[in-house]
Image (cartoon, rainbow, N blue to C red):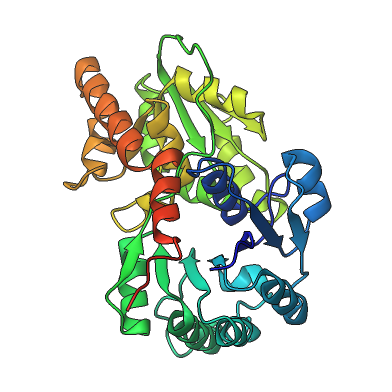
Amino acid sequence: MSASPAVIITTRLPPLICGIGAYSWLAHQYRPNESSPVDFLVVEGAAESRALLGWEAIAEFSGDPDKLLQVLHRAGATNVLLHYAGRAYQRFGCPIWMPIVLRKWKTKFPDGHLTIFFHEVPGELPRLSRHFLLGKINSRIIRQLTAVADVLVTNTENHAMILRKLSRRADVHCLPVGSNIPVAASLREARAETEFVIFGLPFGRWQTLQAFEPEIRNWRQNGLLTKLHLIGPEDEKLAAEANPLIGSLSDIVVRHGMLPESEVSHLLARAQFALTNVTPATWSKSGAFMACAAHGCAVVIKERANEIPLWYAVGAKEVGHISVADIAGRTASLQRWYEENSSWPVIARRLAALAQAQETSP
């Protein structure tokens, strides 16, 4: 195996906003053997990322397959980690050139080791859907990628099931996301029992607000909810739909927009509850859910599930009835589960173990 540095192919790193890029960087930051060299190859924003992150080995290939192949050939027989989502590399979600490039690299360097982390996979779409054909093309691309990869990773069990079907391989690993909001030091605020948080990206916040609208109005009427913090970036396209609903709740809603991580951390440490629309199929890819878990903020879901970690959440019907002691017990269990299963040191250690060149998959 060559002493060349490992290569991580991803979308865009901070300060550009991208969940996949943030995952790539945080998993790298917490990896074991910090002295080992790693080259990042991103679609765009390399100069901004080098300036912010203080990591010089960040280059961009601008979605150009020839540039990508040149970098891989220079790296030689090394470990390559690809963070994949079709739309990250091609506007319609169909980078048909990606499997070709990786196959050429593996043919020239058969001792190279390829791990692919699938952050998105296509679901079943009706034939009349305008996305049906694109979904089929993306499925074909993913099937080709799985044929060249040594290790397959994704972030939900449902995605893992789809990958097993597409690849006809059983060795698909599942890693959850972690919290992208570090817990601020010395958080000792008492919980504000009637303050709630909805936290995350615009569409997720809007979906959550819609899903919980009846409960929000009921809790407000009964004095159980006096302040609802909306935290995260704004989206002009959603504003026309969201503003009427938010306006009708103007007496309790506080729209924070984007905040520094430390301020988000303090709000998550202050509010008693966080509303989220995660389900048993989606919780493991929700950074907002993980941020609340890391901060000991009680997570409220529509229907409490029997499986861990959602067993530690609070069902919407329990708000106003569950005791303070029970809330504390569940959030402590959720926080402990997070530290043991979804914190960044755990994720980075597991991903690094999978990506070791000495390990191969059948």
Where residue 212 appears, x then y in whole percent? Answer: 40, 42
Query: Left or right: 329 with respect to 289?
Result: left
User: Would residue 252 be seen by someone viewing this image from the given angle?
Assistant: no
Q: Position of residue 313 (x, y in %)?
A: 27, 36
Residue in the picture at 78% in, 46% down: 50
Q: Nearer the viewer, residue 206 or 29?
A: 29
Residue at point 45% right, 47% down?
348
Q: Is residue 59 above or below residue 90?
A: above
- 226 or 31: which is nearer to us? 31
**Which quarter of the rendering shows the C terminus?**
bottom left
Q: Is residue 123 above or below residue 237?
A: below
Seen at 76% across and 47% down, the residue is: 49
> Is 213 rendered above or below residue 324?
below
The spot of residue 71 in percent (x, y) is 72, 71
Does residue 20 appear left or right of residue 291 in this picture? Answer: right
Decide if residue 28 is in sight here. yes
Left or right: residue 144 compared with residue 174? right
Residue at x-position 53% and y-position 25%: 265
Q: Quadrant of residue 233?
A: top right
How many numbered callouts?
0
